[in-house]
Amino acid sequence: MTVTSGLWARIIAVLVISHAFCSAAMAFDLAGDTVFPASDPKRLWVLLPVGYICTILIETPVLLIGLSRQITFRQRLFAGAWLSACTYPIVMLVLPVVFAESTRGLYLLVAETFAPVAECALFWAAFQRRLDLSRGTQLRNFAVIVLANLMSFGAGEILATNRWFSLI
């Protein structure tokens, strides 16, 4: 199965719109560089289950719709929960403590780069050898994983802006 130019155009358009959405969400709370990520482990542990559930509720539908049809519905559903289960604890528990003395911007740069890169690597490790997916299909799947992460990041930023759910 080859990826048509029309499909690539749609994927790129969705990524551009998602990036604009996330950038706009992030701009709400850019008061200055004095905002630090929280590093209180008790608070981080309390936020972990709620954030994880919100993340999979946002990311799983994107993966269900966007991932290659060579990956079964059950595998796509599993990927929605499993990929976040592998990266979310690091983003929520480890990185805020590591970047406790850094700016929130640096924390977000590292965390929101780490999550999709790690999830793409995990996805590749789990599915590439079994399904022998073409390069185009793999790139599409990676783009969908990045899009899912951008969507959950944007939602998290909106929730943080309204002080409904935030590390700070």
Image (cartoon, grey):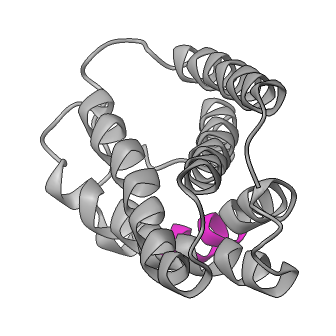
**Residue at the spot 27% in from the left edge and 37% down from the top edge:** 36
Judged from this view, the residue extending furthest toward the front is: 1
As drawn, 116 above or below 93 = above
Query: Which picture quadrant has residue 112?
Result: top left
| x and y, in percent, of residue 48 in the image | 52, 72
Q: Is residue 52 magenta?
A: yes
Residue 24 horizontal side relative to residue 2, left or right: left
Residue nearest the observer in this picture, 118 or 28: 118
Residue beneath the point at 60% across and 44% down: 143
Q: Position of residue 95 (x, y in %)?
A: 26, 58
Picture quadrant of residue 45: bottom left
Q: In the picture provided, is 123 more to the left or to the right than 36?
A: right
- The quadrant of the image that shows the N terminus is bottom right
Identify the residue shown where x is 65% and y is 76%. Answer: 79
- Residue 52 placement: quadrant: bottom right
Q: Residue at x 37, y 62 (%)?
A: 118
Q: Main secondary structure of the magenta part?
A: helix
- The location of residue 168, given as percent across then percent down, is 42, 43
Total number of numbered labels? 0
Looking at the picture, tell me which residue is in the foreground, 61 or 101: 61
Residue 28: x %, y % from top left: 58, 16
> Which residues are drawn in magenta?
46-53
